């Protein structure tokens, strides 16, 4: 029987970045993945939002992704929202296919020495007070102190753990496919009484990507080529001689969220914890940020640095963030309902979003830059992402993000030396200078802090005003 401190089920983007976070913390982690190869069938997630790019920058691997993707200055909520004036180094959406994202993360995880066992399917789990025993469909028995389900919206781990998955039932569905056509396709968007459909050419110049709206919300399972042909004829008046499908699938606007992100020594992250429609391209990004929030906390619990109660903050912080995504995807779906009355509503929403303040608020929400964890009253930075300031340490220029490459908490001081007790020795203490102003999306410029305590996920846990008041308490609470 193989034994590990942490076992992750699922080697998608969420599971891989979680594995990387745990490896950086020096924890024994292993990943199992049902797929035997890294091939991702179909057109899954296709982009990384600004906050996810900042997270990758914090770990020193952003250049790998920028080298392969294409940047666009807009995010979408009903209309395109410009973020090129946002105070972040990554004020854009990076278009990059999920398969490439996974491969780049897998390369990073391999460099960190994390084993990934493909073709391994979780069949059953047995929990006790000291860990989890996992039986696989391949006849293996794995033992781990903790199990994290990063195994997608139909999560086996979530079901086996008995975690409820309430939410909103589907009201409509879409067919998606990559196929060949004997007739010339109608590229671009196409509006009918059933909704907005679309076609686009794939990179090979012969395959057509198809999205057909207004399908039966009760439909399930993989659609057939005949079903696609019938839907094409209903939407376009012809089936275009559709043939040679590369893949066929469907998705709906169902929105669900795990009632609990943790059941004993079993945790959930990514789509295993929440599903929603792909409006705005938020799902993959939400999962990445789940993993970065969870990774350092779970590592500290495993290493005996923190009590298990630290894991309560994972759900307290990430559940509201995911719920907001569920609701904004529902709202975007409503704005796409067919009909003249919905179009009138859409016109008013478009007018609203053309104004500066609404544009900034909604764009910050879609890009993930507005996430604010409730750490109490205080400086506007408290609970928010730390801006990636240009700083100087001992005469050498660097950036705040470079201090987080090893995923350790950072006490960044811009003023006089700070008094803190010996129990906070795990903090990376950095004295630096900073010339300029500190700016947050939507909020704008804020008072420059005298010092900040930055968690490994890049969020600010304490802000100093020149004294050490509250620093020891914050360091003990988190680290």
Image: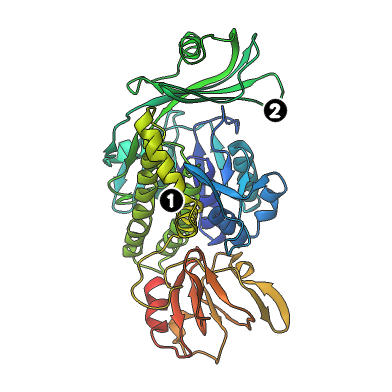
User: Dot 2: what SS?
Assistant: loop
The label nearer to you, 1 versus 2, is: 1
Between 40 and 22, the residue placed more toward the observer is: 40
Q: Is residue 42 visible?
A: yes
- Say left or right for 11 vs 131: right
Quarter-wise, where is residue 41 in the image? top right
Quarter-wise, where is residue 317 in the image? bottom left
Q: Residue 90: horizontal and vertical position, in percent?
A: 62, 57
Among the two numbered marks 1 and 2 on one chain, the one whose residue lies closer to the N terminus: 2
Q: Which mark is residue 477?
A: none
Between 185 and 369, the residue placed more toward the observer is: 185
User: Dot 1: what SS?
Assistant: helix
Q: Is residue 201 above or below residue 415?
A: above
Q: What colouring style does the render use?
A: rainbow
Residue drawn at x 58%, y 77% as measured from the top left: 437
Q: Residue 173: horizontal and vertical position, in percent?
A: 39, 25
Residue drawn at x 45%, y 67% as measured from the top left: 384
Q: Which residue is denoted by mark 2 in the rendering?
A: 203
Q: Is residue 275 visible?
A: no
Residue drawn at x 35%, y 64% as measured from the top left: 310
Between 3 and 465, the residue placed more toward the observer is: 465
Residue drawn at x 72%, y 48% as measured from the top left: 67
Q: Is residue 176 above or below residue 447?
A: above
Q: Which residue is denoted by mark 1 in the rendering?
A: 352
Q: Pointer 1: residues within 10 angstroms few (<14), some, or many (20+)?
A: few
Q: Residue 228: horizontal and vertical position, in percent?
A: 49, 14
């Amino acid at each position: 029987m193989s034994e590990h401190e942490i076992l992750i089920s699922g080697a998608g983007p969420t599971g891989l970045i979680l594995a990387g976070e745990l490896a950086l913390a020096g924890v024994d982690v292993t990943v199992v993945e049902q797929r035997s190869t890294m091939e991702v069938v179909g057109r899954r997630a296709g982009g990384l939002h600004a906050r996810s790019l900042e997270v990758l920058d914090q770990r020193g691997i952003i250049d790998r992704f920028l080298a392969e993707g294409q940047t666009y200055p807009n995010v979408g909520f009903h209309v395109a929202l410009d973020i090129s004036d946002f105070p972040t180094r990554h004020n854009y959406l990076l278009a990059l296919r999920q398969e490439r994202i996974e491969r780049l993360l897998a390369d990073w995880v391999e460099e960190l020495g994390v084993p990934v066992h493909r073709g391994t399917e979780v069949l059953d789990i047995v929990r006790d007070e000291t860990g989890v025993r996992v039986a696989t469909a391949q006849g293996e028995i794995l033992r781990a102190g903790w199990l994290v389900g990063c195994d997608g919206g139909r999560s086996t781990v979530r079901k086996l753990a008995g975690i409820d998955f309430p939410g909103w039932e589907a009201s409509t569905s879409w067919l998606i496919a990559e196929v060949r056509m004997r007739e010339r396709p109608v590229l671009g968007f196409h509006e009918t009484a059933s909704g907005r459909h679309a076609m686009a050419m794939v990179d090979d110049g012969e395959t057509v990507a198809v999205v057909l709206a207004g399908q039966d919300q009760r439909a399930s399972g993989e659609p057939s080529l005949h079903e696609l042909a019938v839907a094409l004829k209903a939407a376009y008046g012809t089936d275009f001689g559709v043939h040679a499908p590369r893949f066929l699938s469907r998705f709906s606007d169902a929105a669900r969220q795990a009632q609990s992100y943790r059941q004993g020594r079993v945790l959930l992250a990514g789509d295993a914890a929440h599903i929603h429609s792909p409006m705005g391209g938020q799902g993959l990004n939400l999962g990445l940020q789940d993993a970065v929030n969870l990774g350092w906390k779970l590592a500290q619990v495993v290493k005996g640095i923190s009590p298990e109660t630290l894991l309560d903050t994972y759900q307290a912080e990430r559940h509201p963030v995911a719920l907001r995504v569920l609701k904004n995807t529902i709202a975007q779906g409503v704005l796409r309902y067919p009909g003249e009355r919905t179009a009138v509503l859409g016109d008013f929403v478009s007018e609203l979003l053309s104004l500066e303040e609404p544009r900034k608020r909604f764009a910050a929400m879609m890009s993930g830059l507005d996430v604010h964890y409730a750490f109490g009253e205080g400086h506007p930075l408290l609970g928010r992402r730390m801006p990636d300031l240009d700083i100087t340490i001992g005469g050498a220029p660097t950036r705040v993000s470079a201090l987080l490459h090893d995923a350790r908490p950072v006490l960044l001081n811009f003023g006089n030396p700070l008094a803190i007790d010996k129990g906070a020795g795990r903090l990376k203490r950095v004295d630096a200078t900073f010339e300029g102003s500190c700016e947050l999306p939507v909020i704008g410029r804020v008072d420059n802090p005298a010092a900040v305590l930055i968690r490994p996920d890049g969020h600010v846990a304490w802000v100093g005003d020149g004294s050490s008041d509250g620093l020891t308490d914050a360091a003990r609470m988190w680290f």
